[in-house]
Amino acid sequence: MLKQVGLDRPPTVRLGDAVNGDFFAGGLEYNPPARGVWNIVHTGMLIPETHEIFACAQGCLRGVILTAAEMNALDRMSWISVSEQDMFDGTLESDVTDGVCEILEKLPCRPKQVLLYLSCIHLFAGCDFDVIIAELSEKYPDIYFADCYMTPTMRKTISPDAKMRAQLYDALRPMGLDRNSVSILGNDRATDENSELVRVIKDNGFVLRDLTACTSYQEYLDMAKSSLNIAYLPTAQFGCEELSARLGAQAMYLPNSFDADEIRANMAKLCEALGVNCPDLTAEENSAKEALAAAKEAVGDTPIAIDFTAVTQPFGLAELLVRHGFDVRYIVNDCLGEDGAAFERLKSLAPDITICSAVNVNMLDFPELEHERVIAIGQKAAHYFNTDYFVNIVQNGGYWGFTGISAIADLIAGAARAPKDRRRLISHKGIGCESCI
């Protein structure tokens, strides 16, 4: 007999009662129709002159193919369907190898690199990925084959997103470090040119390399010259450290923080590595405070809801806004990330904030409930609270530091003043990517 499952798993918890770690018990999940966050298809497409090949079961292929189709990039993707027969007839590796060869022979032009994605079913079956890569590399010595993965079953160890951001730089090999060259790694959109991070690099004469700015495969390969590699997204830290160790470069993690002391400490750390004087950030900090004050005036007493896809430190942003008089009422987030210190401070500062799960199955009908009007920061918050007054960014939107706080404050003020077409915007898969819908 069929029965409902998951009804005993509350989808919300009072912040003051939340424990450090996972806020909700695992179980049946719901995926809300807020699709702006990038996935492994979008991310892989950043490398110029490459081709993606997915070897997956048909059910999995549907999603990645639709992603490529929506971003008008089907010409840069091919696929190999894995059948049940492949699982037990001993041809799992050869089917992938033969399929890739057939695809390459039919392409109108030879790619410089192939991103080959195996799925969890290959890992369950013990597929030897190294053999596949070795055979393909021998047959096509002019193409670099990167072993990539579509393995959501591994997300409790290293997520597919973090693994993909590491594999983006798999083809980079030592070519001599340039002490005047710096790379920003793992981001899927360019860092704000006005940010303290970019300005201190460029204003001191360093060459800034970033995959989001590469227009050719050679420019991508030249990223191996950088003597300093910077990551500021949590999902990029692993790849930054892995690449830097391989190339003998220095790795530096400078997270998107909303804490003034941490922003200053990160800038000091960067300037020390560059060997330059650290700039006085008083003007930038004062501008951020002024932007927050202007946003508070625009928002008034309207409650705020923040979700973890908009910013990588939702509790850090919540603390900043609360300290500037905003009524932060909700945070959509399932587990504590790198802003644990802000979380602990908020437990005393604003313990009645409600933490909502982003994936709990009991959130399915949440948008249909009667909600007070809120201003949402992030697409999932906009969906769950059924509001057209929202900030439409993912992963900080490329903003960083005090200038990033100013930019986000301006976006909050804009969200308070004018509604957006929520249904259209949050259905766009991968913010910033071309879309056919």
Image (spheres, grey):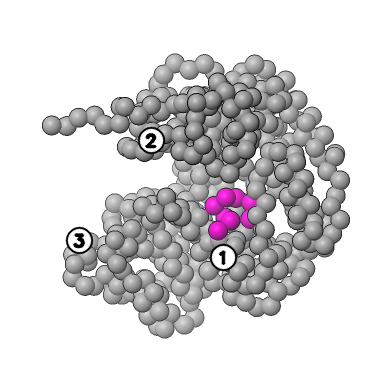
Name the side, left or right, on which 281 lies relative to 337: right
Q: Is residue 435 magenta?
A: no
Q: Are marks 1 and 3 in contact (CB under 8 Å)?
A: no
Q: Main secondary structure of the magenta part?
A: helix
* Residue identifier under label 3: 84
Task: Check whether the beta carbons of the residues at disc 1 and disc 2 lie within 8 A of each other.
Answer: no
Residue 153 drawn at (x, y percent): 36, 52
> Percent position (x, y) of residue 46?
55, 59
Horizontal and vertical percent position of residue 315:
59, 34
Nearer mark to the viewer, of 1 and 3: 1
Residue 191 position, x and y percent, is 67, 51
Q: Which of marks 1 and 3 is nearer the N terminus?
A: 3
Query: Mark 3 or 2, which is nearer the eye?
Result: 2
Whole-angstrom CA distance, mark 1 to mark 3, is 35 Å
Q: Which residue is drawn at 79% across and 29% down?
A: 290
Which portion, as a residue range, is magenta?
231-238
- Residue assigned mark 2: 25
Mark sitting earlier along the chain (3/2): 2
> Mark 3: which secondary structure?
loop
Q: What's the amino acid at mark 1?
A: Glu
* Residue drawn at (51%, 36%) of the image: 20
Q: Marks 3/2: CA distance?
A: 33 Å
Q: Which of 59 and 246 is in front in this view?
A: 246
Q: Residue at x 52, y 39 (%)?
A: 336
Crowding at dot 2, Cα within 10 Å, few <14 / some 14-19 / many 20+, comes out as: few
Q: Which amino acid does label 2 sit on?
A: Ala
Of badges 1 and 2, nearer the viewer stands 2
Lower sequence index among marks 1 and 2: 2
